[in-house]
Amino acid sequence: YAAMAAAALAYMVLQQQDSAGLVTFDDQVRAFLKPSSQPSLLKQVVNILNKGPGRERTRLGPIFHDMAERITRRGIVMVFSDLFDDPEEVLTGLMHLRHKRHEVVVFHVLDRAEEEFPFQESTLFRGMEQMPELLTDPRSLRDGYLEQLRLFTTELEQGCRAQNVDYVRLRTDKPLDLALSTYLAHRLARKGK
């Protein structure tokens, strides 16, 4: 979902003859395409995104600091992530991007099951990014999990807004075209004021 959203926005940017670039990462930068307005960039973007996510544990804060130093021309930095990392480190990294005068948009990508935790029977949760598997009774975890998720997303959303970073929640069960067009219309209306 995040890859499709990033590719769609890169396509739109290139159609306007503006420059687009791409950075993929986990605990380190895995691919870095410098911004370009060449139409051939889209093929490179799609090829990289088709490789899927990295296998290492993602460290957003250090990556954002690295990006702030690598991206020398001021621009719009769009982040697509589940943001599952330390919120303070994430926000500090975003602050560095803002300090370098980039406009930043965070697309917080979550699955419906992550937000609603609908599990009823004993469930084996498979860890991603080198986290272990966990077999558990989800009913006993549901309330605590949902409260922690609410606190986590609230801290990120409020921290982004405090830094003038656009925070957009994307749910993977929602049509991507509707989600992106809603954000873009809101952005356009806000810029027109």
Image (cartoon, grey):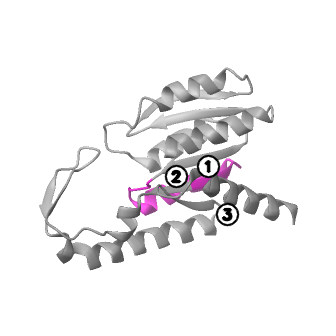
Q: Residue furthest right?
A: 193
- Tell me if 187 is positioned left or right of 30 in this view: right
Residue denoted by label 2:
93
Identify residue type, mark 1.
Answer: Leu
Q: What range is drawn magenta here?
A: 82-106
Gap in angstroms between the C-alphas marked 2 and 3: 14 Å
Q: In which quadrant of the rendered image does the C terminus lie?
A: bottom right
**Spot occupied by residue 151 in the image (x, y as percentages of width and height):** 41, 74
Residue linked to disc 1: 97
Q: Hey, which quadrant is residue 72 in on the image?
A: top right
- The amino acid sitting under disc 2 is Gly
Q: Is residue 179 above or below residue 158?
A: above
- Where in the figure is residue 55, as x and y percent of width and height? 31, 37
Q: Secondary structure at mark 3?
A: loop
The 10 Å Cα crowd at callout 3, few under 14, some 14 to 19, many 20 or more, is some
Among the 4 quarters of the image, the one containing residue 45: top right
The answer to whether the residue labelled 2 contacts the one labelled 3, judged by CB atoms less than 8 Å apart, is: no
Crowding at dot 1, Cα within 10 Å, few <14 / some 14-19 / many 20+, comes out as many
Q: Image height check: is 121 above or below 78?
A: below
Secondary structure found at label 1: helix
Q: Amino acid at mark 3?
A: Asn
Identify the secondary structure beneath mark 2. Answer: helix
Foreground mark, 1 or 3, reads 3
